[in-house]
Image (cartoon, grey):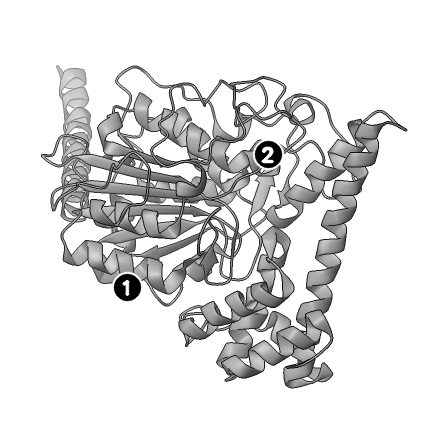
């Protein structure tokens, strides 16, 4: 009897502590869910609809990875229950059947990966991929469209919108294969209009591009109901991944990257997508995914912008959730073979270099491959030289380095006068040629010159002198 009394006496405190712990956990969970609900999380059981806009902003086989990224994102959303009527895809559609693609009609986003091209939507293709069409889609403005499927974002105040962009970027700019670039001020103004028109309850934005942070830095307010992450901060490269070689001059590797002869994905993008495939998105928050992606994307600084309280919502709120059991493969074990990372702006050079390496020696093919590589190198030299000469003409040789590299505090937009930047880009390209992927880095110099007060006439005179050797 004494033993039973003693045992009972020892169990009471234990059972009481256990009950209190369970109640505390339950209360914490309830409190967390309320917080998420207030921030837009509905766990997929709300009345709103999930919408997605996916944009691959490049063309050309050397940019294979951007379209592969977007095709992969589409497959994830489809597998997670989003309907085609609620997904809008921008894809140039020139790589699946490209002459350099060894598996015609197939696109992969990682070594030994599945065909992510199968069944993908093609709402806007070729030269229909413009900033103007993107803005019309986001605003639900069918009358402003030029070509394409005519599908626009018909979302409303209870809906959740996911926007994903993969391509080249630079200071204050995201590129598109046709028409004008996407400028940060225009993009954020469209987001403001979407908010005013009640096009969403909350919105999540993922951007894969160099200097991606410059698109939102100092521009995206916290009160628009938008949470965003970017592959890089406002002053650094993002990175291509699963490449046939590392940076120019490194030793080639085998496997799918060598077979395809180009980078298959982008580091930030494959990080969030492979994480999405490896985890139950109904249990993982956006913040948890951000931290995992940030850890894996170790060559650039993954950033957060906007209303960060929304990161408490589960990823499934925006990307849906698979009904079957999901894999729980640790993220660090995913797709680590044949992994070579290259700065985005050098990925095209890697492609042309690889073309030279694999072409049979002393053949017309090798001559043509070398010619294309030489042209790329010559273009880079031209851009380097012309920008330095423009800065020298306007500010003197001793200011060249500061104009090329100066950055603003991370709470300020990269430029005060956006019209000045747009004019500078157009003026340079009119007299000196298109910047292309490599040359885009020099919008950093352009914003610094704009912030220093350069006027249109001076821009024109300097561009003419640098590229034609004379001044009108």
Q: In the figure, is residue 96 to the left or right of 4?
A: right
Residue 373 image point, x, y percent = 76, 43
Query: What is the quadrant of residue 322 in the picture?
Result: top left
Residue 463 image point, x, y percent = 63, 73
Name the residue beneath numbered marker 1.
221
Using a 10 Å C-alpha cutoff, classify the residue at mark 2 as few (fewer than 14 neighbours), some (14 to 19) or many (20 or more): many
- Which residue in the rendered view is the most extreme toward the right? 362
Question: Camera-side residue: 23 or 233?
Answer: 233
What is the secondary structure assignment of the residue under circle 2?
Answer: helix
What is the secondary structure assignment of the residue under circle 1?
Answer: loop
- Which residue in the rendered view is the most extreme toward the left? 47
Name the residue beneath numbered marker 2.
61
Mark 1 to mark 2 CA distance (whole Å):
37 Å
Question: Camera-side residue: 323 or 183?
Answer: 183
Is 135 located above or below residue 117 in the figure? below
Using a 10 Å C-alpha cutoff, classify the residue at mark 1 as few (fewer than 14 neighbours), some (14 to 19) or many (20 or more): some
Is 337 located above or below residue 149 in the figure? above
Say which residue appears at 74% left-offset and 41% top-offset.
372
Residue 297 image point, x, y percent = 53, 43
Labelled disc at residue 466 = none
Say which residue appears at 48% left-offset and 71% top-offset.
423
């Amino acid at each position: 009897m004494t033993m039973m009394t003693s045992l009972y006496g020892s169990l009471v405190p234990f059972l009481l502590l256990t009950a209190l712990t369970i109640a505390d956990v339950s209360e914490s969970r309830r409190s967390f869910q309320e917080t998420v609900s207030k921030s837009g999380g509905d766990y997929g059981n709300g009345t709103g609809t999930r919408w997605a806009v996916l944009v691959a902003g490049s063309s050309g086989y050397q940019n294979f990875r951007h379209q592969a990224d977007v095709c992969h994102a589409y497959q994830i959303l489809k597998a997670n229950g989003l309907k085609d009527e609620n997904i809008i895809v921008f894809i140039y559609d020139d790589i699946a059947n490209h002459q350099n693609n060894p598996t015609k009609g197939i696109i992969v986003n990682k070594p030994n990966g599945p065909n992510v091209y199968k069944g993908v939507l093609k709402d806007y293709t070729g030269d229909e991929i413009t900033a103007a069409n993107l803005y019309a889609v986001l605003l639900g403005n069918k009358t402003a469209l030029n070509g394409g499927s005519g599908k626009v974002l018909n979302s409303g105040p209870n809906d959740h919108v996911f926007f994903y962009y993969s391509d080249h970027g630079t200071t204050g700019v995201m590129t598109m294969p046709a028409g004008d670039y996407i400028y940060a001020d225009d993009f954020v103004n469209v987001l403001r209009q979407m908010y005013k028109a009640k096009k969403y309850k909350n919105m999540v934005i993922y951007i894969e591009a160099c200097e991606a942070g410059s698109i939102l830095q100092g521009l995206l307010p916290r009160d628009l109901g938008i949470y965003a992450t970017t592959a890089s901060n406002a002053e650094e490269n993002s990175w291509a991944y699963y490449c046939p070689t590392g940076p120019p001059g490194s030793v080639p590797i085998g496997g799918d990257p060598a077979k395809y002869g180009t980078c298959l994905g982008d580091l930030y993008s494959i990080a969030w997508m492979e994480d999405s495939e490896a985890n139950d998105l109904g249990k993982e928050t956006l913040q948890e995914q951000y931290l995992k992606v940030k850890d894996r994307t170790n060559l650039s600084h993954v950033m957060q912008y906007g209303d960060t309280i929304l990161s408490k919502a589960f990823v499934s709120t925006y990307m849906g959730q698979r009904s079957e059991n999901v894999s729980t493969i640790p993220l660090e074990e995913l797709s680590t073979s044949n992994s070579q990372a290259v700065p985005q702006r050098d990925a095209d050079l890697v492609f042309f270099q690889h073309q030279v390496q694999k072409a049979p020696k002393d053949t017309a093919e090798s001559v043509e491959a070398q010619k294309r590589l030489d042209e790329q190198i010559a273009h880079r030299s031209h851009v380097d030289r012309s920008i330095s000469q423009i800065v020298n003409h306007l500010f003197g040789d001793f200011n060249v380095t500061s104009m090329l590299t100066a950055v603003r505090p991370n709470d300020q937009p990269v430029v005060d006068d956006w019209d000045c930047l747009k004019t500078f880009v157009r003026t340079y390209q009119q007299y000196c040629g298109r910047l292309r992927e490599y040359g885009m880095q020099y919008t950093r110099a352009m914003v610094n010159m704009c912030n220093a007060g350069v006027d249109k006439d001076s821009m024109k005179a300097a561009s003419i002198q640098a590229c034609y050797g004379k001044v009108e």
